[in-house]
Amino acid sequence: QWQLVESGGGLVQPGGSLRLSCKVSGFQLFYYWIGWFRQAPGKEREGVSCIGSAEGRKDYLDSVKGRFTISKDVAKNTVDLQMNSLRPEDTAVYYCAAAYNPFGCMPADYNYWGQGTQVTVSS
């Protein structure tokens, strides 16, 4: 049974940091892309960062480049998103998702989703 479980969300002040973690089970992380997506109230879901399967290619949303870093640990079956210099506009529910051969970091290409974790950036 495929399962993705996010953790690490919370409330942080602007300029602060959070580390999100996605624990996957039921499939081999090595063969799949894993992405982090977010959805703010009233907005469409968008791809924040995605990491490729074997070659480990990494894609980032322009607005998070230089602030967020995606990484994966195949042995632990986890994909983390380190978020630094957080801004109020980063506030959203963050989801991790898996896909076999997606075209980059488009939500529609991802088939398996976690339940999400809330990230709130506010003073």
Image (cartoon, helix red, strand yellow):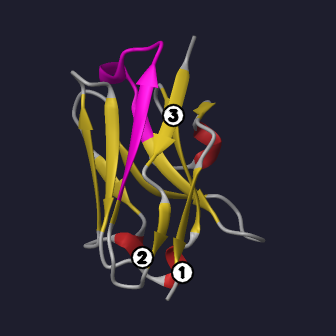
Q: Which residue is mark 2?
A: 63
Q: Which residue is mark 3?
A: 5
Query: The magenta stretch spans which residues?
Result: 19-34
Q: Is 92 one of the magenta-colored residues?
A: no
Mark 3 belongs to which amino acid? Val
Q: CA distance from mark 1 to mark 3?
A: 24 Å
Query: Which SS class for mark 2?
Result: helix
Q: Position of residue 84 (x, y in %)?
A: 29, 71
The circle drawn on residue 89 is: 1
Query: Which SS class for mark 1?
Result: helix
Residue situated in front as seen by the camera: 112 or 106? 112
Vertical relation: 104 (above or below) 5: below
Q: Position of residue 19 (x, y in %)?
A: 33, 56
Please identify the quarter of the rendering in which residue 118 is found.
Answer: bottom right
Q: Residue at x 38, y 44 (%)?
A: 21
Mark 1 belongs to which amino acid? Glu
Q: Position of residue 102 (x, y in %)?
A: 49, 36
Q: Choose the circle earlier in sequence order: 1 or 3.
A: 3
Residue situated in front as seen by the camera: 75 or 120? 120
Are circles 1 and 2 on residues that touch, CB within 8 Å?
Answer: yes
Question: Left or right of 37: which side holds 33?
Answer: left
Q: Choose the circle earlier in sequence order: 1 or 2.
A: 2
Mark 1 residue crowding within 10 angstroms, few (<14) / some (14–19) / many (20+): few
Mark 2 belongs to which amino acid? Ser
